[in-house]
Amino acid sequence: MTQSLEGKTALVTGASRGIGRAIAERLAKDGAMVALTYNASKSSADETIAAIEKAGGTAFAIHADLVDAATIPALFETLDGEFTRRNGSKTLDILVNNASNSGWVGFKDATPESWDTLMAVYARAPFFIIQAALDRLADGGRIINISSAAATKPVTAAPVYSMAKAAINTLTHTLAIELGPRGITANAVAPGYTRTDANAEFRKRPELVKAVEAQIALGRFGEPSEIAAVVAFLASDEGHWVTGQTIEASGGYKL
């Protein structure tokens, strides 16, 4: 069976766990050489690489603390070296901005410092990663930003997070216009409640789970692999006519 992304290269930020890991694994399964970034847990990144390689894929990890914008040039310097050594070229075909940090800071508890930290990872980092990637990104390439259903259905417990994801949707729309002449598509995928270790404690409270699932048309939390499937479609040749879109993958959250 032909792999849909054979010969392609991909960068997935924040891919050592959760949705990011599922995306990295899916793109590698489809044939892409995947570079993934991690911050806090090298062991989780190593586990992701091992899982990809066991399944027959190719991947490597780069450490990057995206709270600090100064790490972005160093990230791409390392990425260039690794792609050139492994593939003979620094060309990047697929960029997935997925990196995250804790977003659940309420309005009354927010501080300038927590606001800056959240916006740095969720909004500033994707902007400057894309800026740095542009002279490496192949014509006909793909940019896929991970947004959230909270961008259009804001979560009152996470106003800064909701703001940042709304900004990503607007950035995505702008990029589609800017990069269309190069045949580069730009889209956002907006997950709803998805079963990851980040919400494991939340899911231990049956009353909260029941309340959330009552707001989802399909009646359950999503799985990371279901988000990764949408990303894989947009990354593939079959997704070439879709650009400037935010695709909500939430099972029908708050319809």
Image (cartoon, helix red, strand yellow):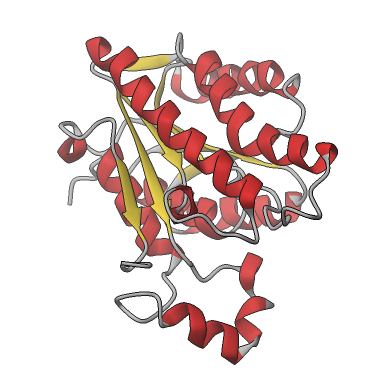
Q: Quadrant of residue 38?
A: top right
Q: Quadrant of the C terminus?
A: bottom left
Which sits in the foreground, 50 or 73?
73
Q: Can you see residue 143?
A: yes
Instruction: Using residue 159 as the reference point, say whether residue 109 is left or right of it.
Output: right
Instruction: Relative to 220, say whether 46 is above or below.
Output: above
For the point 48% across and 40% down, the residue is: 166
Instruction: Relative to 163, say whether 203 is above or below.
Output: below
Percent of width and height locating residue 171: 44, 27
Q: Residue furthest bottom?
A: 206
Q: Quadrant of residue 64?
A: top right
Percent of width and height locating residue 227: 38, 57
In this figure, what is the number of numbered marks? 0
Q: Can you see residue 30?
A: no
Instruction: Using residue 152 as the reference point, say whether residue 104 is left or right of it.
Output: right
Percent of width and height locating residue 160: 65, 45
Which sits in the foreground, 202 or 79?
202
For the point 15% across and 32% down, the residue is: 241
Instruction: Relative to 110, say whether 97 is above or below.
Output: above
For the point 30% across and 77% down, the residue is: 218
For the point 77% across and 48% down, the residue is: 40
Q: Quadrant of residue 104?
A: bottom right
Percent of width and height locating residue 91: 42, 17
